[in-house]
Image (cartoon, helix red, strand yellow):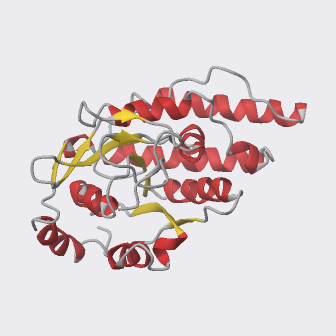
Amino acid sequence: MWWRVWPVIPIGMALARKKKYNLRYEGEENCPGEGPLIIVANHQTKVDVFAVGLAIKRTMMRSRLIPWGKLEIGQGKEGALGWLLWHYLGTIPIDRESSEEMEKAVRMSLEHLRQGHLVFIHPEGTRFPYGELGPFKYGVANLARAAPAPILPVGIWRRRSDHGIQVRIGKPFFMPPRRAGLELLSEAEAAAEERLAHQVELLKRWGDRIPRDRRGMRMFASMVDSVVKRASSQQIRFDHFCRLAEREDNEFLRDRVLELLPSDFRKVDSSEHGASRV
């Protein structure tokens, strides 16, 4: 049991029943009993991480939840609840002004996954209004390619009937096989990284047959650990290792989340509509 969770859950459940949130969730049986997991969800409210955490509280009692979060949350600029979650639960910080954040985030995420933690990501990077699913950023796709850990899709929205928060949890999946070879400057680096990428793909295919019970999830954590160690032993530059995603991968992930949202949701581009700040 993760000691930081058990005193928070009763408080969270009491808050979730308030009219302001009126949290409901479905599909919690799809979430394995423990990590490692990459949780990918759309972003609709300031309390999305909190809402999903309550929906998968059974898993959180065994595995630590680590969200990606922008630095402004830790500075208290997104409200007291966000600040509390940042400092109490722990966060993988994202500085949106830095061009090196993706590599750092993937590196930290792999470290948490190899420990059996739950890495929570909003790939849109910011909130979008009801009915809109924004473009996904490449960080999540690169992590999904680099880590042989199951991906858990989650859809979040405010119900039109009572404006309460709805969470729908989908079934875990892996990325499909890569289509193209890796494009790198060095021929030697390309060969080493191609071998590692192939090893990751093999582990994922094998992972489809692993049960999502306690023993199976610990095997996934060991698989992530072996990939990180192989990358180090083969002297593969980590910035290259963090760029395994293909152009289609973001749309593949976005479609998995869109399937969980109401039928009136649609995919939008950033240029089509500004992200909501309310």
Q: Position of residue 159 (x, y in %)?
A: 17, 48
Q: How many marks?
A: 0
Q: Is 195 left or right of 20, judged from the image as shown? A: right
Q: Position of residue 145 (x, y in %)?
A: 58, 37
Quadrant of the frame with the C terminus: bottom left
- Taking the spot 60% from the left edge, 53% from the top edge, the residue there is 106
Choose between 146 and 82: the one closer to the eye: 82
Q: Is 260 left or right of 21, judged from the image as shown? A: right
Residue 1, by quadrant, is: bottom left
Is residue 255 at all visible to an observer of this figure?
yes
Choose between 272 and 137: the one closer to the eye: 272
Residue lying at the far top in this picture: please name it.
Answer: 179
- Taking the spot 32% from the left edge, 58% from the top edge, the residue there is 45
- Taking the spot 62% from the left edge, 29% from the top edge, the residue there is 247
Q: Position of residue 39 (x, y in %)?
A: 40, 48
Q: Position of residue 272 (x, y in %)?
A: 49, 39
Choose between 68 and 29: the one closer to the eye: 68
Q: Is 19 left or right of 233, judged from the image as shown? A: left
Q: Is 212 left or right of 120, judged from the image as shown? A: left
Is residue 62 at all visible to an observer of this figure?
no
- Taking the spot 38% from the left edge, 47% from the top edge, the residue there is 41
Residue 256, by quadrant, is: top left
